[in-house]
Image (cartoon, grey):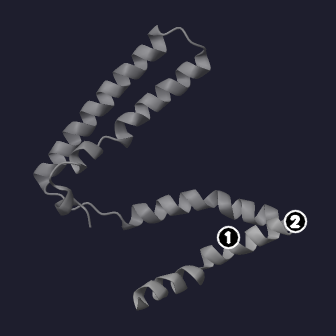
């Protein structure tokens, strides 16, 4: 029971929780913040996603053997080639507006790289790969 209270105390005293409670109270009481505060917090909020991804990227480590990197390279290469071919097919064959075709082409090119490593991670080597 002591651990439950420790967890509750940590949650109630966390800066994020306190911020949410204060903002909900401000909203319920219909209190408006000055425009300067809103502009500053909007700018900081827009940087939040980038900083979160940066922190995850810094903390994420792969520990692979040389032969494992060869498999990763083959999988990524295959995905990039296949996604490039599909993107070119969509771009040159399907009759859509130019902006939609460009978006599909760029998205298809990125898709080959973005998810290329996931299949390998989901195999039996997960414990050896991460951290």
Whether residue 117 sits left or right of residue 106 in the image: it is: left
Residue drawn 47% across and 82% down? 7
User: Residue 62, position in %: x, y?
Assistant: 26, 60
69 w.r.t. 10: above or below: above
User: Residue 28, position in %: x, y?
Assistant: 81, 66
Note whether residue 117 is visible. no
Going from N to C along the chain, the mark reached first, 2 or 1, is 1
34 w.r.t. 12: above or below: above
- Mark 1 Cα-neighbour bin, 10 Å: few <14, some 14–19, many ≥20: few
Question: In what quadrant of the picture does the N terminus appear?
Answer: bottom left
Circle 1 sits in a helix, a strand or a loop, which is it? Answer: helix
Q: Give the numbered dot on residue 20.
A: 1
Residue drawn 62% across and 79% down? 15
Name the residue at the left extreme: 67
User: Residue 129, position in %: x, y?
Assistant: 21, 59
Look at mark 2 in the image and give the residue it sits on: 30
Name the residue at the bottom extreme: 2
Residue 80: quarter of image: top left
Circle 2 sits in a helix, a strand or a loop, which is it? Answer: loop
Task: Measure the alpha-carbon separation of dots 2 and 1.
Answer: 15 Å
51 w.r.t. 119: above or below: below
| Mark 2 touches mark 1? (CB < 8 Å) | no
Name the residue at the front extreme: 1
Residue drawn 68% across and 64% down? 44
Whether residue 64 sits left or right of residue 100 in the image: it is: left
User: Residue 131, position in %: x, y?
Assistant: 26, 67
- Mark 2 Cα-neighbour bin, 10 Å: few <14, some 14–19, many ≥20: few
Residue 9: quarter of image: bottom right
Note whether residue 40 is visible. yes
């Amino acid at each position: 029971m002591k651990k439950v209270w420790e967890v509750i105390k940590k949650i109630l005293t966390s800066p994020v929780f306190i911020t949410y409670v204060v903002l909900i109270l401000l909203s319920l009481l219909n209190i408006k913040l000055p425009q300067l505060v809103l502009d500053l917090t909007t700018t900081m909020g827009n940087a939040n996603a980038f900083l979160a991804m940066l922190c995850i990227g810094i903390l994420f480590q792969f520990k692979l053997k040389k032969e494992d990197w060869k498999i990763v390279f083959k999988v990524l290469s295959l995905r990039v080639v296949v996604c490039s071919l599909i993107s070119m097919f969509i771009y040159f064959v399907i009759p859509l507006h130019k902006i939609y075709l460009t978006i599909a082409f760029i998205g298809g090119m990125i898709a080959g790289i973005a998810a290329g490593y996931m299949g390998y991670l989901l195999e039996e080597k997960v414990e050896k790969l991460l951290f």
